[in-house]
Image (cartoon, rainbow, N blue to C red):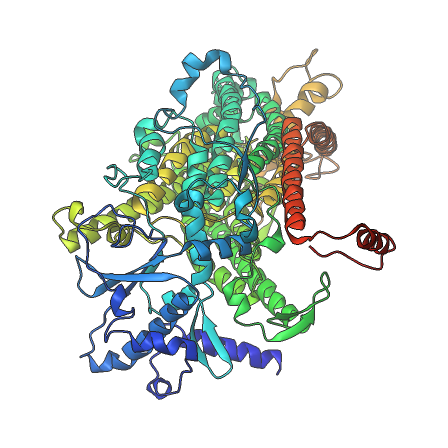
Amino acid sequence: MSDNDILEMESLSEAEDLEGDTDVGMIDEEVVYPEEFLPTYQSIKEGSTVPKAQLAEFNDKPDSLFFNDGVRRIDFILVYEDEDKKDFEKRHTFQRRKRRREYFEASLMKMGMELEATRSVVDEKLMFVKVHMPWDVLCTYAEVLHIKVPIQPNDLSSRPSPWRYFTCITKHFYPNEDLITKEAEFFTAPFEKDRLEYFYIKDKDVFFTPAMRSRMAYYILSRAPYEIRGNIKKFGITKLLDGSVYKAAYPLHDCRFNVKSKEEGCPNERFLLYEEWAHPKSFYKMQPLDLIRQYYGEKIGIYFAWLGFYTIMLTLAAVVGLACFIYGYKSQETSTWSKEVCDPEIGGQIVMCPQCDRECKYWRLNSTCEASKKLCIFDNFGTLVFAVFMSIWVTLFLEFWKRYQAELEYEWDTVEFLEQEEPPRPEYEAKCIYERKNPVTGVKEKVPYTACGRCVRVSIGIGTVLFWILLIVASIVAITVYRLAVFFAFSAKLRAQDLKELEPLKEYVTPQMATSVTASLISFVVIMTLNILYERVAIWITDFELPRTKTDYENSLTLKMFLFQFVNYYSSCFYIAFAKGKAVGYPGDPVYLLGKYRNEECDPGGCLIELTTQLAIIMGGKAIWNNIQEVLLPWVKNLIFRYCTRVASQDMIPRWEQDYQLQPVSKLGLFYEYLEMVIQFGFVTLFVASFPLAPVLALVNNLFEIRVDAWKITTQFRRMMPEKAQDIGAWQPILQGIAILAVATNAMIIAFTSDMIPRLVYYWSFSVYPYGDHASNTMEGYINSSLSVFNIKDFSNTSKPLSTPYDITTCRYRDFRYPPGHPKEYEYNMYYWHVIAAKMAFIIVVEHIVYLTKFILSYVIPDVPYAVKEQMKREKYLTQVILHETNLKLVTKRLKPIDDETFKHVKETVSKGEMELDF
C-alpha cells in the first residue's frame, strides 16, 4: 500500500468520525463485538448505556465525589445526550452513536473500570456516566505509567531559608500556613505492583492522589476501543468527543470554589486555591506552588512557577527601566539638539524639503519641537546603558531559572521523567500499520508511516508554514504601501498653515506621527486576524505529521506557532527599526517602492519614536485583547448558561453537573498562555533599547496575568487534566534563542535607528577644529550639521512641489551629503563615512563584550544547585538500598535449604558463568 493510499484512508477515517458521519449506507454494516463483551450487552437497558444494576438516581448530596454507595470515588465523568429517537432524520446518527457508546463503555468495564450513570437534574436529556478505578486497576496502570510514589519519609534536613530572620514580615506575603499546610517530603520510586509492602501506604483510598487517578483514568479512556470494523480498530475518547458521541469528558473539581464542601474528608483544595491564590485580595502573596501542582499536576505547576519567577525577575528590569525613563524625561528640557530644534532662531529658520511628491509643502523644522522633546526621553545615553543591562539581565534570568527548575524537578519527582516513559498518543497508535526494527531495543515495532512517508508529511508541513510566513510578509508590504499613500495625504493636510480644527493638537500631530499611529492600529488588527486563521492551519499540519508522543506533538506545534507569531508580531517593528528611512535617496533623486510610492523618511530626530509608538500600541492592545478573551468571554458564557438553565440554587445541582456548566478546557491547554508570555518576553528584550518602559508594562501585566489565569482556571473552567512535565519544554530553547538575538537587535537599534552614534561622532570629531567651528567638544550646531542642503532648482518634474514660496531657494533634508555647487554635489560626505565606521565598530564591540559576559555567566552559574545534587544522590542511594533489600528478601523466600555439596557446585557453576540465577 502506498503512502498516498494511506493519506486517503486517513482523510476518509477522520471525516467519518466527525459530526457529519451520517451516511445511511454505512449504518447497516456489521460491527464486530468481541465475545467477551456479549454478556455485558445483554444486560444493558434499552435507551441506556450501562448495566441495569449501575443505574442510579441523584442522592441529594451535591458535594459528593463518590458513587451512590458513598465508597467508590469518581475518577472521571463522561457526558452524553439521550437524543430524540422520534426524529427520523437523526435516527441513523443516533443509532451509530449509541452503538459506539455501548461498545466503548463495555470496553471500559472489560478493562476493569466501574461505571454508574445518573440523569441530569437540569436537563432530562443529559446523562452523566461516573467512572471509578478499583485498587487493582490503579496499581496496574500506576506501574505502566511509571508513577513515582513514596517509599520512605525524607530524613534530609532542608536548607534554611535566607529570609528566616525576617519571618515576622515575610509571612504576610505567603499563603496562610494554617490553611495550606506544608506538604510532607518523601523519597520516592516508580510504583511496582509486586512490591506493595515496601511502599509507604497508610490508606489505599488516598495513596494515589486524585490527580494521579484522573491521569490514569484518562490513559485508559484514550485507549479503549469503540468500534472494530474488519481489520480497522477505532479507539479513544478524543474521537468520540469530536464525533459528538459524548458531549464532554473531564475530572471533577473537589468542591465549589467559594464554598467549602460539607462532605467528610474532602480536602477542599479548590476552595483553598481560590482563597489564597486566585482571589484578588491575595494579589500580593506568593503562589502556593505545591498545592497547585498537587491539584492540577506538574505541567500546570511548572507554568505558574515559571510565570512567577519571570515576574519577580522583571521587577529588577522594571526599576532600572523606570530610572532610565525618568532620566530621559528630566533631560528633555536640557538637551542641546532638542533646544536647537525648538529655537525660533535656529529650527524656526530652517526650511525642510517636502517629504512626498508634488502635493507636499515645505515646512519649518521647529514644527517637530514636541516630537523632538519626546524623542529625548527614549534616545539618550541612559538607553545605551539600559540595553547592555538587559542583555545581562536576560542571561541571569535564564540561568537562575534553570537552577530553580532543577529544585522543582527534585521536589516534584520529575528528575527521571524520560521520553520512553511517555506512552504514544492514541492517534499515533491507531494508524500504525508498518513495521520497523527499533534501533535501540532491536525489537520490531509498529509505525504509522515509512521513512518516505514521513518526509512527505514534514515537507508539506514546512511548505505550509513558509506559505503563511510569506503571507505575513505580503501583509507587511501592503501596510507599507498604506503608510506611503497615507503619509502623502497627511503631509499635504497637516502641514497646511490654515488647519483650524486641529489647532490645540497641531504641534503634536505631525505627518509621521499620524501615519505611524494609524498604521500601527491597522497592523494590530491584521496580526490578530492572521493569528486566528493560522491557528487552525498549524493544528491541522501537526495532526497530519502524526507526532508519536504528546510532548512531541506540543513541541512541533510550538515551533510552528512561534515561527508564525514571531514574524507576525515583530515584522512591523523590524521594518520601522531597520528598513524605514534607510533608502530614501535625496529630494532630487528619491527612491520609489514598486516604482510608484516614494519611500518614507524619518523625522529629523530619527525613527526611534515611531518604533516606540508601534511597541506601545501592540503591547497594550495585545494585553487588552488577551484579557478580554481570557476573562470576559468565559465569564459571560458561564453567566448566559446559568441564566438559561434557570436553576434556583447550586445546592440542588450535583458536583459533576456543576462542573459541566463550566467552560471546557482547550485541547492545547497552556499553549496560548506560554505563547502570550514568550511574545511579551520578545518585546521586552528585542526592542528594549527603544522603549525602556517595556519591562514596567510587562511587570504590571504579569501581576494581573498570574491572578487572572488563576481565577480563570479555578472558577470558570472545568478541572484541567493533570499531566506530568519536567520543564517548560520547547519554550526553553526559544527563550534562549530570543536572548541571543536580543543582543544583536538592541545594538543595531542604537546604531542604525537612534541618533546616538551620529551625535557622538559629532561631539568627539566634527564639533571642533578642523571640521567644526568650536574650540572644545560641544553639541551646539549638531542639528545644522546633520541636515544637508538642497537647491530647489534641482527638483525633477515628478517631485517638484506645486507651490514654492518666493523667498525660498534652498531646503534641508536629513542626510550627510555635499551641498549644491560642490565638486561632489549630493554625494556622501566625510561625516557620513565616519558615522558608518562608528556604527559598525559599536555593533562589533558591544556584541563581543556582551556575548563574552553571557558566556562567562552561563559557565559560572551551575544549572543544578549543589544542595539539590546532594539530595538527588542521597535519594538514589536510599532507593537502591531499599530495592536491594527487597530483592534479598525475595531470594530468601524462593531458595530452599540445600546441602553443602550442592551449594558448592552451584557456586562454582555461577562463578564460571555457566549458570545465571534468575530471581
Residue 205, percent from left and from top: 39, 46
Quadrant including the C terminus: bottom right
Q: Nearer the viewer, residue 141 or 894?
A: 894
| Residue 364 visible (yes or no) | no
Q: Residue at the far left: name it.
A: 648
Q: Nearer the viewer, residue 844 or 150?
A: 150
Horizontal side of 588 relative to 268 (left or right) equals right
Q: Nearer the viewer, residue 806 or 407?
A: 407
Quadrant including the N terminus: bottom right
Residue 18, percent from left and from top: 38, 72
| Residue 184 visible (yes or no) | yes
Q: Nearer the viewer, residue 570 or 572?
A: 570
Above or below for 281 versus 648: above
Q: Residue at the far right: name it.
A: 912
**x 57%, y 55%: residue:** 422
Residue 623 occupies quadrant: top left
